[in-house]
Image (cartoon, rainbow, N blue to C red):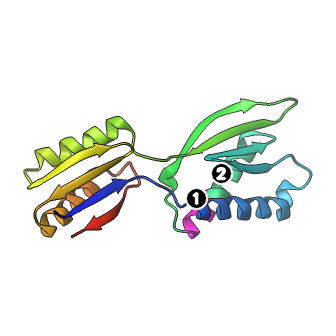
Amino acid sequence: MPSFDTVCEADVVEVKNAVENTAKEIGTRFDFKGTSAAIELKDKDITLIGDSDFQLQQIDDILRNKLAKRNVDVRFLDKGDVQKMGGDKVKQVVKVREGIATEDAKKIQRLIKDSKLKVQAAIQGESVRVTGAKRDDLQAAMALIRKDMTDLPLTFDNFRD
């Protein structure tokens, strides 16, 4: 029975490379000289450190440009609140989204069920498996998910015939 998995996973290697390139650009840019501007990656958390909110925004813009150049969707990033550190430093934690949240998985499942396509959707952990009898129905389900779930950077894996 043909099937595919709908997942939400960023390319971790490309994210790491984008963070490293951002750190390199911060080190060479004139407007960041003599400031505490920095960027760090630990597990799935990117920490932006700067002297002001404006500087954090500049670092974020650089990071988003580097991610876009590496074909990583910026919708994977969940910005946290700006927090005060000691002195006049501020930091912001940006989480890299991994997996589909339960409520979003239920939306995908409901969307497929309401579409009257001859496919079934089953939630499996942090992914949604879609199975059907015909390959054309599965491709129609992919198109439907892409069209209606625009707020999530979804990819389709494990397409089996």
Q: Is residue 68 left or right of residue 91?
A: left
Residue 56 place in picture, x, y as percent: 71, 45
> Which residue lies at the image location 33% right of the left edge and 35% below the top edge?
103
Residue 137 place in picture, x, y as percent: 13, 63
Of 8 and 67, which appears nearest the observer? 8
> Which residue lies at the image location 19% right of the left edge and 41% below the top edge?
110
Q: Is residue 9 left or right of residue 104?
A: right
Number of residue marks: 2
Residue 143 place in picture, x, y as percent: 23, 62
Q: Residue furthest front?
A: 1
> Which residue lies at the image location 20% right of the left edge and 66% below the top edge?
139
Prevailing secondary structure of the magenta residues: helix
Residue 69 shown in magenta = yes
The numbered mark, 1 or 2, whose residue comes first in the sequence reads 1
Identify the secondary structure beneath mark 1.
helix
Q: Quadrant of the C terminus?
A: bottom left
Residue 54, image quadrant: top right
Residue 48 shown in magenta = no
Query: Which stretch is magenta?
Result: 64-70
Q: Amino acid at mark 1?
A: Val
The residue beneath circle 2 is 60
Q: Quadrant of the N terminus?
A: bottom left
The residue beneath circle 1 is 12
Crowding around mark 1 (Cα neighbors within 10 Å: few <14, some 14 to 19, many 20+) is few
